[in-house]
Image (cartoon, rainbow, N blue to C red):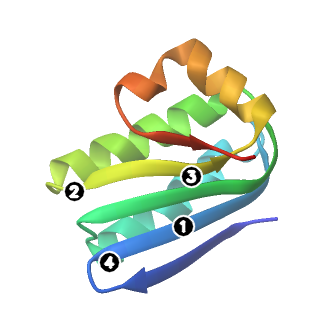
Amino acid sequence: MGVTCTEEGRRMTIQISGEVDHHRAKEIMTELERAVEAGLPRQLTLDLSGVTFMDSSGIAVLLRTYRQLAGLGGAMEVAGVPPQAGKVLKAAGLERLMPLEYKD
């Protein structure tokens, strides 16, 4: 359960695993913010394939990271979105802001 970051040039992939709920949202946001500040990526892929549950706090996590990247002139995509998290993100209309790739 956590946040794992890999970098290749100015491309960064951050994998989030476990639950993304109101109990963990602040911790996840802090870790994402630090990783982005340290790496200054042009392209960020958030990999949610390890997420087991997401509530509306996950929307805030993604939006905050999206805004941070936009402020740096970067772009963000979300990959491996599990079905349950996909319902939360679709309900919020996040696919209008960032590409969402759903887990098969």
Pointer 3 or 1: first along the chain: 1
Residue underneath mark 3? 79
The disc labelled 4 sits on which kind of residue? Gly
Residue underneath mark 2? 74
Frontmost residue, 22 versus 97: 97
Local secondary structure at mark 3: strand
Residue underneath mark 1? 14
Between marks 3 and 1, how big is the CA–CA gap?
A: 10 Å
Local secondary structure at mark 2: loop
CB contact under 8 Å: marks 1 and 4: no
Local secondary structure at mark 4: helix
Indicate which label's residue lies in the foreground, 3 or 1: 3
The disc labelled 2 sits on which kind of residue? Gly
Q: Is residue 10 above or below residue 82?
A: below
Between marks 2 and 4, how big is the CA–CA gap?
A: 11 Å
Between marks 2 and 1, how big is the CA–CA gap?
A: 15 Å
